[in-house]
Image (tube, rainbow, N blue to C red):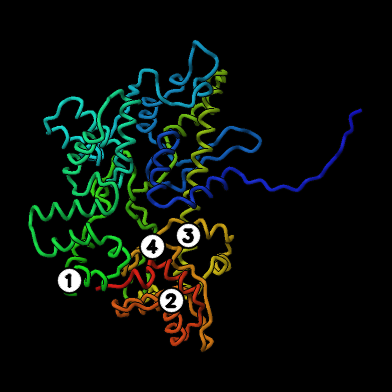
Amino acid sequence: MLKQNLQQKLGLKINPLQIQLIKLLELPTFQLEQRIKEELETNPLLEEGEEHPEAEVDFKEGENEPEVNDGEVTEEENRESDDEFSLEDYISDDDDTPDYKLTASNASRDDDSREFVVSGGESFRESLMNQLGVRHLPEMDRKVAEYIIGNIDDDGYLRRDVENIVDDLAFGVGLEISEEKVTELLHLVQEFEPAGVGARDLQECLLLQVKRRMEEHPSPALENAKVILEDYFEEFSKKHYEKLAKRMKVSDEELREAVDTILKLNPKPGGQLSDASVPGAEKIIPDFILDMEDGELQLSLNTGNIPELRLNKSYLNMLDDYQKSATNSREKKDVVSFVKYKLASARSFIDAVQQRNNTLMLTMTAIVQFQKEFFETGDENRLKPMILRDIADITGLDVSTISRVSNSKYVQTWFGIYALKQFFTGSMTTSSGEEVSTGELKNALKEIVDGEDKKKPFTDDELMELMTKRGYQIARRTIAKYRQLLDIPVARLRREV
């Protein structure tokens, strides 16, 4: 027997406008620009241009019909509108079902659907293949060399053993070839530009570059560098410079020149040319611009190439004409239903973009006021301890909203570009009772490391003692944590000749 139960539940639902706003808040400027372009392409009710406040589209109470109040429209404008748009253009006599209900594409079947590929320049592998193309090789050798190039990674290294390549060629391609021949063709690829390409490890990569330079401009420093890489690479990698000098029987100055030569080599030769198929690092486009004018801070949004949005008046006039029309065929109702759907979508998108901009300005204004001393001086030691809750309390916004605004956003100041995340730091109390930010601690630690004797760099225990003398009582593990965040290696790896 079936039992019926009645339950009462409390739930939270987010309306579509809020969801759209949340998504737009997370987008930095360059992604917002792309998002707006996509919306302009998919929604004919949107167009570029400044929105006029008198152009309002309201829905009558109790009806789904919109009422258009956009001021006076001249006869010439009406004539142009009639020439460009007509309800008959959207009505199909062959089918009662409108096309827009059957497909998500606004493109006609007659439209050219070819995709246009924009070249991003010569890629890393294309460069290697072009260099191979000018070499006169037998067909089999060329195929093997192409296979070797195909196995070189984006850093320029061949991570596979020659033996495995021989097996792959035999079972996968059907080419029977010896390891000696593959090694010979690998050495041919290693002659290509950039120097060091095709190396199987870091030692071989650096050695290839040194040998290339010795062919062009031989010098004692290069000779010593070659010896280090060939015979004493382990001692070099561990920075045992005293052992190196004794075993090589060279002076400290000669060793220093050889080490400097090696350190100037490129450990990732493939990085010199970006692969068109792999997206590279994107250029930072600031979302805010903070200027100093007459001693006052001036904050503005960086609109860049972001267009102003407004409703398409031609479609609004068309909708108004239909509302006044006496005929009410099913086809025309379907068309108007489509236009009204796009109209509501356009209005909600414009509102979401405007609300996004207001939220961003409200949040950034609060950050600037909170960190005013830093923005006026550019001194990172003036950064105050600040968390998301501090800005949320000032603005009245939720912490999650502040987090979305600060994520992936940048501000351009008169002294540099900063990520908004950098302004949110923890805090600690010094021995004098003063509260300082973690940013100040990092700067103090970096200052000590920069001023140390590189022949005898400070250990973490010594760094902890020096920070304590400055009034910063922090544990050794915290020193190690901040050192890693600042990309400062351990003392042994900071040692120099």
Residue found 57% across the figure and 57% down from its top? 400
For marks 3 and 2, give the CA distance: 33 Å
- The residue carrying mark 3 is 406
> Which residue is nearer to you in this view: 9 or 352?
9
* Circle on res. 411: 4
Residue found 38% across the figure and 62% down from its top? 411
Q: Earlier in the sequence, mark 1 or mark 4?
A: 1
* Circle on res. 67: none
Q: Earlier in the sequence, mark 1 or mark 3?
A: 1
For marks 1 and 4, give the CA distance: 54 Å
Residue count near mark 3 (Cα–Cα under 10 Å), binned few <14, some 14–19, many ≥20: many
- The residue carrying mark 2 is 460
Q: Earlier in the sequence, mark 3 or mark 2?
A: 3
- Which residue type carries mark 4? Val
Residue count near mark 2 (Cα–Cα under 10 Å), binned few <14, some 14–19, many ≥20: some
For marks 2 and 4, give the CA distance: 34 Å
Measured along the vertical axis of the image, is residue 333 above or below residue 20?
above
- The residue carrying mark 1 is 249
Q: Nearer the viewer, mark 1 or mark 2?
A: 1
Residue found 31% across the figure and 73% down from its top? 495
Element class at badge 3 = helix
Q: Nearer the viewer, mark 3 or mark 2?
A: 2
